[in-house]
């Protein structure tokens, strides 16, 4: 099975020792993404804005391998506060269609002003 590192300007550049993503055979793994705008380096103080940017960053990584959000089979979501759970669900379902990816949602401390982090696994057979 081949393995390729994914690099793109459409997601924030790693600030520590990790890759934005990897393709291993037919699977694509993204690193946990947060709501940093890759063009400006800014992070909004608003949960909704952070979540939209986080999901846009994931799209940017998947796009390198010609995958879409429809190819995502699993996500792990980390919320800085579980009070965001309902808002997460409302926004999340605008990015994914049924059948929705399997998902784990965790409440945990995140660095700085980060309110949400999401990692994704997508299945996209090589053509």
Image (cartoon, rainbow, N blue to C red):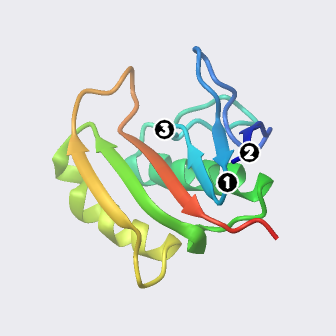
Where residue 126 sits in the image (x, y, percent)? 77, 65
The furthest residue to the top: 16
**Helix, strand or loop under label 2:** loop
Viewer-side label of 3, 1: 1
In-image side of 121 versus 58 (left or right)? left
Looking at this view, is 9 or 119 the one in front?
A: 119
Residue 10 sits above or below residue 80 on the image: below
Label tally: 3
Q: Residues within 10 Å of mark 3 (few under 14, many from 20)?
A: many
Residue at position x 75%, y 44% from top? Answer: 10
Residue at position x 59%, y 15% from top? Answer: 17
Disc 3 from disc 1: Cα separation: 20 Å
In-image side of 9 versus 70 (left or right)? right
Q: Residues within 10 Å of mark 2 (few under 14, many from 20)?
A: few
Residue at position x 25%, y 27% from top? Answer: 109
Q: Circle 3 is placed at which residue position? A: 32
Circle 3/circle 1 CB separation < 8 Å: no
Viewer-side label of 3, 2: 2
Q: Circle 2 is placed at which residue position? A: 2
Residue 50 sits above or below residue 48 on the image: above
**Helix, strand or loop under label 3:** loop
Q: Earlier in the sequence, mark 3 or mark 2?
A: 2
Q: Earlier in the sequence, mark 1 or mark 2?
A: 2
């Amino acid at each position: 099975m081949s393995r390729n590192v994914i690099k793109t300007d459409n997601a924030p550049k790693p600030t520590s020792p990790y890759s934005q993503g990897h393709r291993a055979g037919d699977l694509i793994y993204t690193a946990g993404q947060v709501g940093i705008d890759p063009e400006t380096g800014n992070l909004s103080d608003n949960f909704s804005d952070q979540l939209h940017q986080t999901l846009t960053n994931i799209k940017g990584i998947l796009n390198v391998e010609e995958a879409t959000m429809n190819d995502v089979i699993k996500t792990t979501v980390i919320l800085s506060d579980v009070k965001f759970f309902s808002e997460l669900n409302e926004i999340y379902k605008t990015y994914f269609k049924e059948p929705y990816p399997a998902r784990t949602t965790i409440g945990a401390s995140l660095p700085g002003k980060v309110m949400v982090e999401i990692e994704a696994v997508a299945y996209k057979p090589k053509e």
